[in-house]
Image (cartoon, helix red, strand yellow):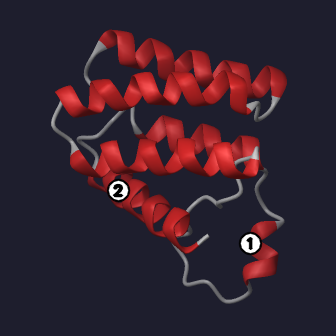
Amino acid sequence: MENSNAQKIIKALQADVVANGIVADNLVPELKKLREFALLEEKPFLVKALRLAYEHIEENNDFLVNIPSDEPIEDEMEINSENTASESFNYFMSLMLDLDNKHNVADLKEYNVQFQQF
């Protein structure tokens, strides 16, 4: 995201998750604020990703989707154990800091698929 206030929110969320883990009451309101910035920047895939993320956290009180893999998924259980909810959330947030990178956009779209399949 290009807006400096949005970038501050992203970094603050990442720091909060490192310090406190996934706490829905802390994350959901901030993700909703970020979604407003995404609407202003006219990035529909990001608007969707943020909405799906905060709905997922509200429903599960956790971030239960995995970091998208560059490799084809062979054994899902093995991948599930490789990253924690905090790591996956922080990666998800870091993707938003550079939306000019086509790989970041592709990973955000993969998160959208995972949220919808969850």
Image side of residue 61 versus residue 106, left or right: right
**Image coordinates for residue 60, horizontal then vertical, percent:** 74, 52
Displayed quadrant of residue 102: bottom left
Residue 1 in view of the camera: no
- Looking at the rendered structure, the secondary structure element under dot 1 is helix
Image quarter of the N terminus: top left
Name the disc covering residue 97, or none. Answer: none
Name the disc covering residue 103, or none. Answer: 2
Which residue position is annotated with label 1? 79
Report the residue at 21% width, 42% height from top: 43
Image side of residue 1 versus residue 62, left or right: left
Query: Which numbered disc, 2 or 1, marks the residue that appears first in the sequence?
Result: 1
Report the residue at 63% width, 42% height from top: 89
Displayed quadrant of residue 76: bottom right
**Image coordinates for residue 40, horizontal then vertical, percent:** 18, 26
Image quarter of the C terminus: bottom right
Report the residue at 62% width, 37% height from top: 90
Give the camera-side residue of 104 and 89. Answer: 89
**Image coordinates for residue 49, horizontal then vertical, percent:** 41, 49
Report the residue at 45% width, 69% height from top: 113
